[in-house]
Image: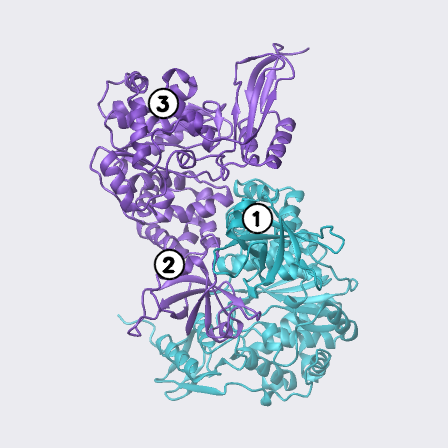
Chain colours: A purple, B cyan
Amino acid sequence: MKFKIKKLGISTGNVAIVVIDDEDAFTMGAKPGDRVKIYPVLADDTLGPAVNAVVDHATGEGLIARGEMGLYDEVRERLHLENGQFTVELQLSSKPKSFAAIKAKIKGETLTPKQIDEIVQDATIGNLLPIEIAAFITGLEIRGLSDEEVVELTNAMANSGEILDFGDEVYDKHSTGGVPGNKVTLIIVPIVAAAGLFIPKTSTRAITSPSGTADSFEVLAPVAFSKEKVLEILTTEKAGILWGGAMDSAPADNTFIRIEKPLSMDPFPLMIASIICKKMSMGVKKLVLDIPCGKGTKFPTPDHGRKFAQRFKLISSKVGIETVCILTSAYQPVGHAVGPALEAQEGLRLLRDYSAGPASLRNKSCELAGILLEMAGKSAHGTGKKLAKEILKSGEAYKAMKRIIKAQGGDPEIDPENIAVGPFHKELYAEEDGYVTEVENAHVNRIAKIAGCPAAKKAGIVIEKKIGAQVKEGDLLFRIYSDSEEKLQEAVEYYNAHKPQILGGMTIERI
Amino acid sequence: MKFKIKKLGISTGNVAIVVIDDEDAFTMGAKPGDRVKIYPVLADDTLGPAVNAVVDHATGEGLIARGEMGLYDEVRERLHLENGQFTVELQLSSKPKSFAAIKAKIKGETLTPKQIDEIVQDATIGNLLPIEIAAFITGLEIRGLSDEEVVELTNAMANSGEILDFGDEVYDKHSTGGVPGNKVTLIIVPIVAAAGLFIPKTSTRAITSPSGTADSFEVLAPVAFSKEKVLEILTTEKAGILWGGAMDSAPADNTFIRIEKPLSMDPFPLMIASIICKKMSMGVKKLVLDIPCGKGTKFPTPDHGRKFAQRFKLISSKVGIETVCILTSAYQPVGHAVGPALEAQEGLRLLRDYSAGPASLRNKSCELAGILLEMAGKSAHGTGKKLAKEILKSGEAYKAMKRIIKAQGGDPEIDPENIAVGPFHKELYAEEDGYVTEVENAHVNRIAKIAGCPAAKKAGIVIEKKIGAQVKEGDLLFRIYSDSEEKLQEAVEYYNAHKPQILGGMTIERI
């Protein structure tokens, strides 16, 4: 059935939907939620390539007339309509074969490479509905995947987009996440870039955390570029800190993530495939993987982290990536600052002045950077960290950072002290003497998010006293920054109700 | 944040969605797909009860202005907005606690009654997203439920709506489905009603089959009534053949079904809870359950059906319903007609004239009706079928049917021969001699659906020769009816490509 298109200007968060009149839907036999294929009718009356979507019904407020088809943004983008092209052919379509493969996994069967390819392809082109992908992810969560299946899934996801090739010497770092203030990328990339390593670092924006690396670096320079511009930056600078989301590499991964996140599910096989396929897309060959372990991370104990690390190494090696995994401790924030602008500021201060610290950020960054330097043969086994510290201390890393900022269109001479934060802020002081015995990362994150992170770049927190610090009544413990007085107030209230720093005395036990 | 509402007139198939301007969404921190609560602002400026929804973004075609909130039909209905009431307060809301219970089931834990109640309540009020319900159903499919969990689920689902009470003597029949032309309800209800039993039969419309009982009976009389009207009909007639969908009984069940169907999943625990909760809603106390077993049904072998039957009996007894389960054979259609009008016609012919047959419809209907008569003490164990046949033969069942048709607003004197079918039709003849050795139900259903069922009530098929019939070249084998010449042609093409009746000769094997 043919329809004239009408743009609705509504974005659904990636569910491809079209709206047709109730009567037209009846004629077609299309119920709300039914699956259709949309073919653009070309100038010569032939049909262009189809786009998959789901039907909604217009029910008589005059928005959609008979013979019209309302297009949501997601479908409009996929249709690539040319100027003046406004007729489409709509056909009911049936469930794709890949759904049978999803059902097979739910039944506990091992999937063939062909089945895995079909699932990934259909997910990429929008031929699987969100509820079908949710069923797949739940199936993976319960049934798991064999190593062979994960390798195939990784390859299929990488091949859902373009795979860049920069030769054999391409390095990267990645973190499985879960620690507040983990801004080590801002230090590692310039250190290894200064040593001459090629590091095309793509990062995510925050999804559930107060700030992703892309959010923090964006305070210093743009991070969202087309693939062409990324290639230009990397060819010149051999390093970058980029937002992966703008590049549409491994689009299948994005489709899965859009369902995983609201389900708060991240089954290990899919997590491994997701990390590795994105690295494959950027042509990475050698990787250091930071695996924070402990409360609030994906790995409650180092044992959990170790098992994951072994599997990750195996699978990455099967797709041509050499990985060194480092289990790290996650019991409190890295450094003191949490929030895009505050983290950019803290990172830049350390790059500019080695002695500025903080020690935790300096140490963790140099340990991870050191692994990459060793993998590249820049230093002997066990001496990478020392070399990384030297590069950082010498100011070469800072120079490399300035080159990257400039290449990405930022101001390389930006003074960290001039990075705008707040403007509203509140200092919180100790009400008694004691020692910081514990830090609740979850509360730290929550306070930063209530204050406005990650959307408000200038919002965030600074934790002044960390574990082991001796505290006297009246000492400064915590700062909160926000772009709104109201949000600041809310964040302070949350702070007072859930003090994130636990002040123990010297008492161990009272009997 | 406050918004003025704007009706969009789009129906999404029960996903509650609102559209706000991109900038407003940014101010609220609401990403597409985020969960919100909508509070109507009442005349005295207080807030009415909240409705849950998901946010879409308007992206600048002028459909939604800043400060406006576009409402899809589903949300509009739930908000119960009064005249002139057009301001709402929108607040971001977080994942409900019930999602943690869903995750617990996915992990393989046994759910507490409280957890099950929370899931059912949140599903009912739209507080769980479709992908979250899909994860729950997939979890049930893999992990299953204990009998105690199913009992709790059944109770919670029944309590999601009103539960009617007609005393202790309330009878019903139900079928687990999968056989084409299974129009036995049209015979059973009038038989047992004629015997004085109270039978408030609610049926479904076809979802994946060519005709549901509600679709077929609707050819004779309306089936969609408000709860008030249903009570009126049942109080007077003590019997009815009604469309359950119009009554909103056990609304939680409908929510689950809307996700199960597109996933083609129907985990047994949920299937049991679904059937029983609907019966509880109608105050049913005694039930005969028809369990067709065989290819194309939910039970490939009688063994599968037997296990299901035992579990069903146990669970229904725990919620106060006595059930007798009957395993029936499903290897070919019941009777000859498939499709709403053709089935109504075949049923009415049998009611009017016992000798008209068809024998399979007469026998199956009387067997099941007989069980109910025995349960009611109207006849001794083993003699119910005989009594059912007598009632059918005497014309009393036909009289009861006419009373039901009249009470529901149809024409009780309708002559089955005057029920309109087609009008386009095609007769298909045997091309060789032989015996019908097999009937492919799936092809029978497909042909009826291609011809236009269930939307086109006059469409359908008549299978003239069933298993065991001797066929001579040129004998009439099959008829197809359609409301459109084009669909008829398509259905004939499908018939020719997939002959649903397999004509074997006398050869067993060629060596």
Callout 1 amino acid: Arg
Tell me the number on the disc at residue A78: 2
- Mark 3 and mark 2 on one chain: yes
**Residue under circle 1?**
B35
Q: Position of residue A320 (x, y in %)?
A: 25, 37
Percent across and percent down for residue B356 are 59, 86
Q: CA distance from mark 3 to mark 2?
A: 43 Å
CB within 8 Å, label 2 to label 1: no
Label 3 marks which chain's residue?
A: A
Q: Nearer the viewer, mark 3 or mark 2?
A: 3
Judge whether residue A303 can be spotted in this image. no
Q: Residues within 10 Å of mark 3 (few under 14, many from 20)?
A: many
Q: Amino acid at mark 3?
A: Leu
Query: Vertical placement of A70 versus A465: above or below?
Result: below
Residue in the foreground of this view, choosing between B377 and B493: B493
In this figure, which residue is indicated by the disc labeled 3? Answer: A351
Tell me which residue sits at (53%, 20%) in the image.
A464
Q: CA distance from mark 3 to mark 1?
A: 41 Å
User: Marks 3 and 1: CB-CB under 8 Å?
Assistant: no
Tell me, for residue B436, which label it has, or none: none
Q: Is residue B201 above or below residue B435?
A: above
Name the N-terminal-most of marks 3 and 2: 2
Which residue appears farthest toward the left when viewing the image? A167
Residue B457 picture location, percent across and down: 54, 79
